[in-house]
Amino acid sequence: MDIEKGAGKIAKCLRLMLKDKPGHLSSVTNAIAQNNASVGDIHLVRVGRTHNTREIVVYVDSEEQFDELVEAISKLEGIIVEDLIDLVHQVHEGGKIATRSRVRIETITDVRQIYTPGVAAICKDIQRSPELANKYTSIPNQVAIVTNGTAILGLGDIGAVAGMPVMEGKAVLFDHLVGVSGVPILIQSHDPQVIIDTVLNIASTFGAIKLEDIKAPECFLIEEVLDAQLDIPVMHDDQHGTAVVVLAALLNATRFSGMMLKQATVGMIGLGAAGMGISKLLLSYGVKKVIGTDIDSNARERLVAAGGKEGTLEEVMQRANIVIATTGRPGLITPEMVRKGSVILALSNPNPEIEPELAMQVGASFAADGKSVNNALAFPGLFRGALNVRATRINNKMKIAAAQCIARHAEEHELVPSLLHPDVHKEVTAAVERAALESGVIKHWDGD
Ligand SMILES: NC(=O)C1=CN([C@@H]2O[C@H](COP(=O)(O)OP(=O)(O)OC[C@H]3O[C@@H](n4cnc5c(N)ncnc54)[C@H](O)[C@@H]3O)[C@@H](O)[C@H]2O)C=CC1
Ligand SMILES: CC(=O)C(=O)O
Ligand SMILES: [Mg+2]
């Protein structure tokens, strides 16, 4: 089901008993339309003598709107609301991922091959030639998804365990979109050195390390040290995955509005992990004017050190042609602040600094939020491509190649393609592989 395209953002499900007579289902869909909600999937779950039971998914903007809709439907003649199903909690029951075997076991001979005694021959091969781990184990297809829970989406420091559903979500996307096994690693520490040491000690299990939802400024040091010490790719998704998808969105936004990205004034609101990752990639792409604000003076200094300028929130909103917000503060951008014709990417999740519809109503030329301009468009292909060619790192050339590829897959007047675009992740993978090969960050590549 396509939540992005639904009128509302929240998917809800009602189980209804409807009299088996013409007109009852349409009275329900009418009530949904009258309450400004929209209809998703409809499943017939039970056929009775006088009544049928159907589960109907509806998209709403708020819990209040859903309550009003349920009340309206309960008053309809011939309809009984049997249950309200919470789809989000339902899909999380039991967790979203599991380790599954890639081999079948049918006989005891199979057991003796995959396990002892057969397996010992493989162990000894790898002991003699460690390189063979890439052929005979799952290591080169496994990516650690490492968090300490300090910046889970825009929810703040809620702890690593509370962040696990996000890490599992990233693992599901890895598997579904590019066949990578993502393994969540929860680290119970705020100390960068503990995180560095923990990752260094477990890194040999993985083909790459994806840091996730670790707050600034600790995330910068952690990534820098791990990148220097490990010969596998280490990438903090909130910095670089986000930067790639933002660059893709801006390549399209500026093309549609006849602006030159490199000449535009880009305003950054929030200079944490995401804000700094975006600023650095835009500066290295050639954007000349990046002006940024943050409530933390150290963060503003970081931008200046990287080649940007600092300003107040008001200055950023008045001067920038393009505004990118990554503060975790819903509603921070008020309608009065929006400059006519500007591009607004309000990227905080789960709720943006300004709703895109509102920004457009008050004069933005393009606006998007963090669920459509989302690093999930970038990280699968970045890691898949890097793993495929055994790149030792993910460099700017690979990131820019990924961004250009994502931008090309958007439909006319779309900033970025759908996350479920049938080709985008395959094509990003190929673009990243080419860029890695061209920039020589390959440990060993035998060409097949
Ligand atoms: N759409 C996407 O793909 C992504 C979205 N994000 C979103 O960006 C937000 C920030 O994430 P991170 O950068 O990882 O967190 P972070 O904690 O590293 O950075 C947040 C920054 O915002 C600043 N900030 C907070 N309130 C502010 C205000 N009122 N005005 C100016 N600056 C303010 C903080 O001082 C901090 O520097 C989150 O809501 C997250 O969901 C992050 C990564 C990807
Ligand atoms: C998308 C993402 O990584 C975040 O909001 O933190
Ligand atoms: Mg994140």
Image (cartoon, rainbow, N blue to C red):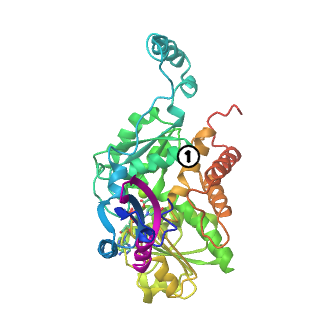
> Is-magenta flag for residue 36?
yes
Relative to 171, is 18 on the left or the right? Answer: left
Q: Position of residue 9 (x, y in %)?
A: 43, 69
Quadrant of the rendering where the C terminus is positioned: top right
Q: Nearer the viewer, residue 29 or 356?
A: 29
User: On screen, 3 above or below 429?
Assistant: below
Does residue 421 belong to the magenta stretch?
Answer: no
Q: Which residue is at a point 33% across and 44% down the rendered structure image? A: 186
Residue tagged by mark 1?
A: 383
User: What is the secondary structure assignment of the residue under circle 1?
Assistant: helix
Q: Is residue 211 left or right of residue 322?
A: left
Residue 30, how many percent across, how many down?
Answer: 44, 76
Q: Amino acid at mark 1?
A: Phe
Residue 84: name its quadrant: bottom left
Q: Is residue 105 above or below residue 399?
A: above
Q: Classify mark 1: residues with Cα within 10 Å, few (<14), some (14-19) or many (20+).
A: many
Most extreme residue toward the front is 49
Q: Is residue 348 visible?
A: no
Q: Position of residue 132 (x, y in %)?
A: 57, 23
In the rendered view, does 153 fall on the left or right side of 173? left
Q: Total of numbered circles in the picture? A: 1
Residues in magenta, as a range: 26-52
Position of 251 relative to 91 (above/below): below
